[in-house]
Image (cartoon, helix red, strand yellow):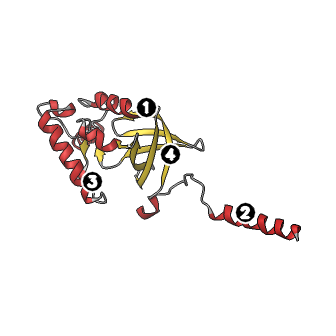
């Protein structure tokens, strides 16, 4: 009787263990639909590349390159680019964060909302004038968050915070287009 109970208990534990999904990340491929990208995990920020790109290490030791969703920060060689990076560094460098994946971009980076100390880091970058709200890629953003990000950007502009302290700040997407155009022109010569 006791032997039968032990076997039943062991079988139950094995079954229960199989039903509980561990918190880990699964490699993504670009062919996956965005509905498969609604994963979340905790990680530690190990590198800040610029004002909207970071590298994290999850609890399993796996590193992930992350593009902050719904924002676009100045490129590092652009006016305010290094300041934007410094702003993000102050917010999250070395800290534990919650990564809420929204998509995978063409460079195979996870596009994600980042939370640190219970705050939306992506939003904070916009609020501090360290990034634009990237409306071109905010189509899947919740309506209330879209409005909140837009309001934060308008307020940062009004207060001339960060990149808005420049008379005519150049949007990163325009800067990248200009750089591509220069490369095309120089290869044609």
Kindly report the distance in space between the C-alpha atoms of the residues bearing marks 4 and 2: 26 Å
Q: Residue at x 24, y 39 (%)?
A: 127
> Which of the image's four quarters has the N terminus?
bottom right
Count neighbours of disc 1 (C-alpha within 10 A) and say few if under 14, some if 14 to 19, many if 20 or more.
Answer: some
* Of the image marks 1 and 3, the number of the one nearer the N terminus: 1
Residue designated by label 1: 93
Asked if residue 17 can be seen in this view, the reply is yes
Q: Identify the residue under disc 3.
A: 145
Q: Examine the image and state in which quarter residue 4 appears.
A: bottom right
CA separation in Å, label 2 and label 3? 42 Å
Q: Is residue 120 above or below residue 90?
A: below
Q: Residues within 10 Å of mark 4 (few under 14, many from 20)?
A: some
Please state the horizontal and vertical placement of residue 38, each as a whole percent of the image. 44, 58
Q: Which mark is residue 13?
A: 2
Q: Residues within 10 Å of mark 3 (few under 14, many from 20)?
A: few
Q: Residue 84 location in percent, x, y?
A: 29, 32
Between the residue at mark 4 and the residue at mark 1, the CA separation in whole angstroms equals 14 Å
- Spatial CA distance of label 1 from label 3 is 24 Å
Name the one closer to the observer, 67 or 19.
Answer: 19
Packing grade of label 2 (10 A; few <14, some 14-19, many >=20) is: few
Q: Earlier in the sequence, mark 2 or mark 3?
A: 2
Query: Distance from label 1 to label 2 (Cα)?
Result: 40 Å
Residue at the spot of label 4? 42
1 vs 2, front mark: 2
Look at 45% across and 50% down and name the residue there: 108
Mark with earlier residue (4, 2): 2
Instruction: Decide which of tag 1 and tag 2 comes sooner along the chain.
Output: 2
User: What SS does tag 2 mark?
Assistant: helix
Relative horizontal placement of residue 14, taking residue 138 as reference (left or right): right
- Say whether residue 14 is left or right of residue 109: right
Q: Position of residue 54 (x, y in %)?
A: 42, 38
């Amino acid at each position: 009787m006791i032997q039968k109970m032990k076997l039943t208990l062991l079988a139950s534990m094995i079954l229960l263990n199989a039903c509980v999904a561990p918190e880990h990340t699964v490699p993504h491929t670009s062919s996956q639909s965005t509905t498969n990208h609604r994963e979340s995990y905790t990680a530690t920020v190990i590198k800040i590349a610029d004002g909207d790109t970071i590298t994290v290490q999850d609890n399993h030791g796996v590193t992930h390159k992350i593009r902050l969703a719904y924002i676009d920060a100045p490129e590092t060689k652009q006016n305010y680019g290094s300041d934007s990076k410094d702003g993000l560094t102050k917010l999250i460098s070395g800290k534990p964060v919650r990564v809420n994946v929204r998509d995978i971009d063409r460079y195979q980076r996870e596009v994600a909302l980042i939370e640190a100390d219970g705050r939306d880091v992506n939003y904070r970058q916009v609020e501090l004038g360290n990034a634009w709200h990237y409306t071109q890629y905010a189509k899947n953003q919740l309506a209330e968050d879209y409005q909140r990000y837009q309001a934060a950007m308008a307020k940062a502009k009004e207060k001339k915070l960060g990149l808005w302290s420049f008379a005519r700040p150049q949007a990163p997407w325009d800067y990248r287009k200009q750089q591509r155009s220069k490369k095309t022109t120089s290869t044609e010569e």
